[in-house]
Image (cartoon, rainbow, N blue to C red):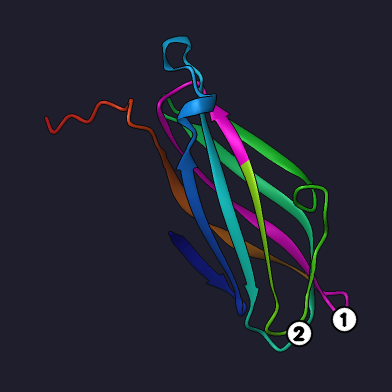
Amino acid sequence: MYTETTRGITVSVQPVYLEDQSSPNEGHFVWAYRVRIENHSDDTVQLKRRHWKITDAKGRVQEVQGAGVVGEQPVLAPGGAYEYTSGTPLQTPSGIMMGAYQMEAGDGEKFDVSIPAFSLDSPHEVHRLN
């Protein structure tokens, strides 16, 4: 589990390699990732936008931006939480993801909450010590 807290908003991510949706011989590797966002601040916040940076093992970067997550812009009251599952494919057997959510506080202030960098690892990755 990967976790990071910004301004009282904690984002936790758990990636899972999806063997049944991947085709390693064709250079197609797929992961699901479960995200939990917890509001430990004193303010009600709404998740307005997402910005992901996905880097594969060859250093190729894909950026994904858009409104909300999985078609929603959840509102989190103090003590509230929101969870969702999404996924990403890569052309390599490993990679890394990181990003930020743009939140809006009740008074209209917008601020970014960091999504922790997390590793996308498959059993098809060859690890070499030297």
Magenta span has 108? yes
Three-letter code for the amino acid on which mark 2 is drawn? Asp
Q: Are marks 2 and 1 in contact (CB under 8 Å)?
A: yes
- x, y (%) of residue 62? 61, 32
Residue located 56% across and 41% down the image: 32
Examine the rendered structure and indicate whether residue 39 appears above or below residue 82: below
20 or 44: nearer the eye?
20
Examine the rendered structure and indicate whether residue 15 appears above or below residue 113: above
- x, y (%) of residue 76? 76, 74
Residue extending farthest to the top is 26
Viewed as shown, does residue 49 lie left or right of 87? right
Res. 130 image quadrant: top left
* Mark toward the viewer: 2 or 1: 2
Tally of numbered tags: 2
Residue located 86% across and 80% down the image: 106
Viewed as shown, does residue 123 lie left or right of 45? left
Q: Is residue 60 visible?
A: no
Q: What is the quadrant of the N terminus in the image? A: bottom left
Residue 107 circle label: 1
- Mark 1 surroundings within 10 Å by alpha-carbon count, few (fewer than 14), some (14 through 19), many (20 or more): few
**Label 1 residue SS:** loop
According to the picture, the residue beneath numbered tag 2 turns out to be 43
Examine the rendered structure and indicate whether residue 99 appears above or below residue 4: above
- Between the C-alphas of marks 2 and 1, the distance is 9 Å
Residue located 50% across and 27% down the image: 20
Residue extending farthest to the bottom is 42
The region drawn magenta spans 87-109
- x, y (%) of residue 12? 53, 63
Viewed as shown, does residue 23 lie left or right of 42? left
41 or 21: nearer the eye?
21
Residue located 82% across and 54% down the image: 72
